[in-house]
Image (cartoon, rainbow, N blue to C red):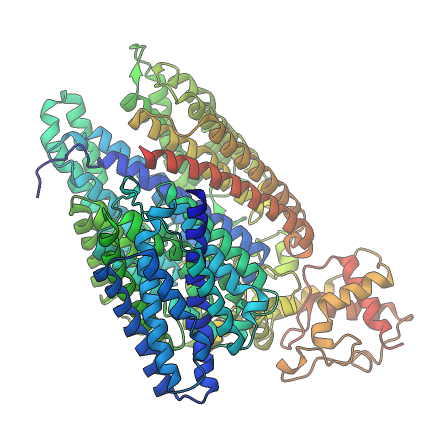
Amino acid sequence: MRTAAARASLAVAGVYGFFLIFAQFAFVELLRGAGVGLGGEKAVLGLMAVAGIAGGFLIAWRGASPCGIRLSLMAAALAPEATAFPAALGVALVTGLALGMATVGLAALLPAWAGVAWVGLGTGLGYAACNLPFVFQQAPAIQSWIGAGFALAGCLAVPTSREWLPQETRKIFPVWAAILIFTALVWMDSAAFFIIQHSEDLKSGTWGEGHLWRNAAVHLLLAMAAGFWLSREGARSLPAVAWVLLAVAALAVNHDASRGVAAWFYPAGVSLYSAALVAWPGWFSGASNPRGAAWRAAWLFAIAGWFGSANGIGMAQTLQRVPPVFIATAGAGVIGVMILTRRKSLRPALAVGVVALVAVLARGGPASTAPAPSSAAERGRRVYIAEGCIHCHSRYSRPGSPDEAIWGPSHGAEETLKGEPVLIGNRRQGPDLSNIGARRSEAWLKVHFLDPRALVPDSPMPSYAHLFEDGRGDDLVRYLKESGVESIPVLMETAANWQPAASSGSPAEGKALYANHCSACHGGLGGGNGPLSHHFARKPANLLKGPFIWTHPDGNPELRLRVARVIKFGIPGTDMPGHETLTDRDILTLTDHVLGLRR
Amino acid sequence: MREGPTPTDPSGLSTAVRHALGWLLFGNAVGIYLSVLLLDPGWQLGAWTYGRWVPVHLNVQLFGWTSLPLVAWLFSIYQVDRSRLAAWGPAAVWAWSAALAIGVLDWLGGQTSGKIFLDWKSGALWAFTAAQVILWAVLAAAWRERSAYWPQLRRAATLAGLGGLALVPFSLVFAASPKVYPPIDQTTGGPTGSSLQGSALIVVGLMLLLPRVAALCKDSRRRPGIWIFFALSWIVFGVTEAMGGTHHDPHQIFSMLFLLPWVWWLPRDWRRFEWPEGSVAWRGAMFGWWGMLVVTSLAMYRVGVLDRIKFTQALVAHSHMAMAGFTTSFCALLIVLVTRRRMGPPSSVALWHGAAFAMVLVLAAMGWMEGAHPSWMLASPAWRELGLLVRTACGALMIGASLLWYLERRKS
């Protein structure tokens, strides 16, 4: 029994391996390499899909058998013949039929050979094998030979016994529900796959050099986990978890900052549901014999597999992204079906429907459709609220506290409480912003929003580059620039009265401080040509020449103090920011380093 | 439509408990994700930034994990599951969760009122109001049917309860309005001592009510003192709240001092009741956290201390002491009382509290350092990241414990 199970698992791996490396990758590339146009490509792939559906229904009608599966996998080994049009049409027809027959036949007979955990292992092995660098990075022609090898290996692995084990089958979802759930998942998978595949930076960030071994491991581990989970009665909740993982991946691919996240979640979600997709007809559809399982598999793979995949790719081709509403719709489909098939009473669905209807109606109400304010600063205030800036930034410099020396003068509670809503905040992960307009320029704020760590190393603030795609970022900058701008005279007075209460540190410390806090704008050597200098209308000062040319590094302590004050408090009204969070000792150390640059 | 529940239908009470634990799990997962984001902002998911996830974490913990056990308690008090409308109990819970889910999507989409813990706005606000109306209707219908079998006092008290509950949706709409903001301590920008006393007194009221509704009294002697002091505390709150002021003002400190007797009095009061098996660990934990909360609140309200820790991680530590420590213990105890079943294996209970305590200690230490110099978080990235790493690890352990609780309930 264990030998049959291992062989069945390898057969699953072979079919998945062939499907992934040939049908999803190499075949399309071979067509393009042979100069087949978009119309021809669609025709060939369409033919493969129709043949796949036909093959599935054919084996369901004629009855699944090990022999039939073997023959179809042998036919699939014709893959390397797909060199050009019209031979590609023939290969599409044959491999489509072969895939349809092999997948449906295997799904129907697997319970005769193995426990469901073995399906997870086979799925994981198939995915992992395709992600190995020496497979994934081969030329399409070689990949089609590798695909043929997978098909032949699968053919040899197919066990011979046909004993059906009805005691292991359960009905988790009815046919319509399983079709809906898996269609939604395949739809999301295909759309995210297409977008990743057709964007060079995404591809290098997810399937590029160095990621392949990791992807192979994630696929293998998650598919095995799926098999284990399915064997432990987790079949109901697995699709929802797969949706969550795919949803995270699909959202993450839309933005530069989060594409690394997609590289983890995408293979995890795909592996989970792929194992369940193979297992459902035999174990969880309620089929009492291979014929029943084959019919269910034929319908499932035809609609969810071929149709869902084509639609996902079509949508991604049109929109070039995965819209959140599409992800939410897929999630509503998956979770809605799970709820509807579980609850005997429709009352919860009715109550949820009422609540959802109220939300929709209220959203269209007069309060929600009020026109956006005409002032950029007021629009920016709305962005500040929407982005939840209050969760990291206070807007209250406490009167009489050390806050005032660092974040500027207090505006008092009365002034702060005038806001609707009050944006006082309750936690500082970052600086207080009540006087930010007096402490930072618009250009500095924008650069910081685009890439906070470029200006402030180790900053926990995320990038808000996406806000500048539609003007919200500029509005937010305008709002911040107007915050406390009237405090400039007070800040200048504070700076003028400031006396550092410490001695300076070593030159090495000064160099490190300069690298961290100054070099991005003023350049590594102080020439005013740092990597961020081009963002500012007036170039950052060339510290080798001026404006400190009139100071003497070793001489006048008053001039040294003036430079220290500039470093500590910046120059209000210019792009030069203060370094309010540095200690007096750090400021003096940095001052000495900056003055020493001219020597 | 069937008229009543069949044995295979979940009850409203068990549905509320399951949903509460589901939201706890989700809220904890979001919490750990927030910790990860602070360590590495590169884990941000597109436009769903840290600032958009925070209201999800806070509101899910408050309106999901904390509120739904109270809903289960209401089902128990009004005997919804024994009424002909029992099948509507789960529906009311699903409506509640659906409204919260709509809220989650809205907050992630940037739709927020901008008020912490009251981020409800637009569609989500009215959806949540609708869910509360559905719940109230179910309770009212159950009362109408079941109250005929109850003694006069219970009938009157539960009717008054219904009256109070009818005000909740209006209160929420009012409180979520951006035009409303409570008085603040002008020196810190935080709540006044009397505000803290007022919110704590609501919790005291719940703790006075819980054993009288859910446990058996083994000592029938009347002790009016506790109720007199409770009423007096509310009067002190009303007067000092009207006077306003800061933590430098004696009357605000005086109002906070009125919380201190409850550290001793509440456990003493609870000893008069018989408690079901499986509740002792949660009761002990709850009073442990309660004592810590009150004592640290008083200590933190002192001049010099509050000035140092305002806006720092120390207040985050205090919030976790309140939510992860005290409130979680209270909700878990409530679940034990209404279901008469344990909440997780003892090891998971110890794991939760151990991890929560370690998290509180680390955050408090970070806050104390930060208070010495307001820029400590920015200027000491290595220490900040170490602290956040420990916090993340504690969060992972707490997720593990809450997963066990969820799975245990789901199986049943």
Residue drawn at the location 29% of the way across and 63% of the way down: A301
Residue A203 relative to residue A184: left or right? right
How far across and how far down the image is residue A379, in percent? 41, 72
How far across and how far down the image is residue A296, in percent? 24, 56
Residue A87 relative to residue B135: left or right? right
How far across and how far down the image is residue A73, in percent? 39, 65
Image quarter of residue A81 = bottom left
- Camera-nearest residue between A313 and A562: A313
- Camera-nearest residue between B264 and A317: A317
Residue B175 appears in the rendering: yes
- Camera-nearest residue between A140 and B14: A140
Image quarter of residue B317 = top right
How far across and how far down the image is residue B408, in percent? 37, 33
- Quadrant containing the C terminus of chain A is bottom right
- Quadrant containing the N terminus of chain A is top left
Image quarter of residue A525 = bottom right
Residue B118 relative to residue B264: left or right? left
Residue drawn at the location 36% of the way across and 27% of the way down: B207
Q: Is residue A366 above or below residue A198?
A: above
Residue A388 appears in the rendering: no
